[in-house]
């Protein structure tokens, strides 16, 4: 075969290179769990008909139990300031923060009872299987202490580019959370400073449901919109519309940005976007806002479809060039599905801001989003709260 002409070190180097080039499409923690599950799957599957689902289920449960214990050890060592000796940290150097325990064994058994992963003989546990199990475990851990739920918008509570309709199953779920005295917020990259009408349009189905249910002011007042990742906060009024929250009420030092540095960051990002579009032959226009810059399809290119690879290239290039510029400001450069945007600030600061404003702790907050890869804008929330990684609105509800 063609690879046989390469020496062993060369083959290892090529494997390392391929892994590095694919890193932005993977989640290191999930990949470790996948690898741990693969051994019992192969061993039991090799036995053919002799392998029972019960035996494989028990083997998988033991793996999740082991990972659960490693999470507990990691949390304990982190609290003691000894995170560097954590076994889990050595396996996953990019590991985020665990704000609660993760009952993974129980979550796996529930997921398996619904989806029969242990009944498969040719398809081992997948990325999505493990993602769902992690979500089950996280919601199990936080449900009794939940005080704040934040949602991404596109592909989380409504389809990409769509509005939230009254018939959406997510609407009654949000109403239920608010009536249980849980705060809810849409945390979105879409930034419309002092312009609540744009958010009212996207969330018309929810606001209409508030009105149809005659929800009182104290209930609807628990719903917020935080735009531009962390820059513009709106709250719901008794008449079921949004109003801007005065900056003085919610500002924290972490989101008080020097304007000259803001413009420097946006200059670098805009230049990178324009150069990247030209280099890849992308017929995209560039739009600059007070706290963001990004691409969009002009009217004469409405049918043009960007490849994911094109957008990932733009996002990763911007991340590199803005970091090189050393503006000292937090930022987020992400692939939005059919566009790329760069925001001053990020959702880590957005969820932190809401926690301070609403007096909630990280272990009492969960963020739902679909962008948890390195080119996404939800991944930053892993540093400030619990998270649930979903892939479409149907999974959210």
Image (cartoon, helix red, strand yellow):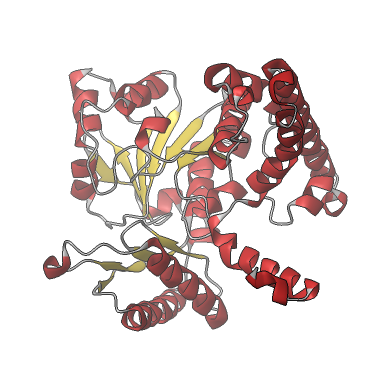
Q: Nearer the viewer, residue 79 or 96?
A: 96
Which image quarter is the C terminus in?
A: top left
Q: How many marks?
A: 0
Which image quarter is the N terminus in?
A: bottom right
Residue at 58% over, 32% down:
364
The x, y position of residue 78, in whole percent, is 80, 46
The x, y position of residue 297, in whole percent, is 21, 66
Residue 220 visible somewhere in the drawing? yes
* Furthest-front residue in this view: 1
Q: Nearer the viewer, residue 41 or 349?
A: 41
Vertical side of 304 occupied by 181: above or below: above
Vertical side of 348 occupied by 272: above or below: below
Residue at 16% over, 62% down:
302
Q: Quadrant of residue 326?
A: bottom right
Residue 145 visible somewhere in the drawing? no
* Furthest-left residue in this view: 300
Residue at 42% over, 31% down:
395
Residue 14 relative to residue 364: left or right: right
Q: Quadrant of residue 344?
A: bottom left
The x, y position of residue 319, in whole percent, is 50, 71
Q: Quadrant of residue 339?
A: bottom left
The x, y position of residue 158, in whole percent, is 30, 39
Residue 171 relative to residue 249: left or right: left
């Amino acid at each position: 075969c063609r690879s046989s002409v390469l020496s062993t070190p060369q083959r290892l180097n090529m494997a390392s290179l391929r892994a590095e080039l694919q890193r932005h499409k993977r989640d290191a923690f999930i990949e470790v769990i996948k690898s741990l599950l693969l051994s019992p799957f192969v061993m039991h599957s090799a036995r053919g008909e002799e392998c029972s689902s019960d035996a494989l289920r028990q083997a998988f449960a033991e793996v999740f139990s082991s990972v659960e214990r490693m999470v507990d050890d990691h949390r304990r060592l982190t609290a003691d300031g000894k995170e560097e000796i954590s076994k889990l940290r050595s396996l996953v150097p990019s590991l985020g923060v665990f704000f609660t325990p993760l009952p993974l064994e129980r979550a796996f058994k529930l997921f398996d009872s619904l989806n029969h992963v242990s009944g498969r003989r040719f398809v081992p546990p997948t990325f999505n299987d493990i993602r769902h199990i992690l979500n089950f475990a996280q919601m199990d851990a936080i449900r009794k202490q939940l005080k704040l739920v934040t949602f991404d918008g596109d592909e989380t509570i409504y389809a990409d580019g769509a509005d939230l309709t009254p018939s959406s199953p997510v609407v009654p779920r949000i109403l239920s959370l608010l009536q249980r005295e849980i705060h809810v917020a849409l945390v979105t990259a879409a930034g419309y400073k002092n312009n609540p009408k744009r958010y009212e349009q996207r969330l018309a189905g929810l606001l209409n449901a508030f009105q149809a249910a005659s929800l009182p002011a104290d209930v609807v007042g628990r719903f917020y919109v935080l735009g531009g990742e962390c820059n513009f906060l709106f709250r719901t009024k008794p008449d079921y519309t949004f109003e801007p929250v005065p900056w003085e009420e919610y500002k924290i030092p972490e989101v008080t940005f020097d304007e000259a540095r803001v413009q420097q960051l946006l200059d670098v990002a805009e230049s990178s976007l324009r150069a990247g579009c030209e280099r890849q032959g992308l017929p995209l226009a560039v739009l600059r806002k007070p706290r963001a810059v990004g691409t969009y399809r002009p009217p004469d290119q409405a049918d043009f479809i960007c490849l994911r690879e094109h957008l990932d290239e733009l996002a990763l290039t911007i991340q590199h060039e803005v970091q090189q510029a050393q503006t000292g400001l937090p930022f987020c450069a992400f692939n939005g599905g059919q566009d790329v945007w760069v925001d001053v600030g990020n959702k880590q600061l957005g969820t932190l801001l809401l926690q301070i404003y609403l007096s909630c702790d990280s272990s009492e907050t969960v963020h739902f989003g679909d962008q948890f890869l390195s080119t996404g804008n939800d991944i930053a929330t892993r540093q400030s709260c619990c998270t649930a990684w979903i892939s479409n609105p149907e999974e959210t509800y």
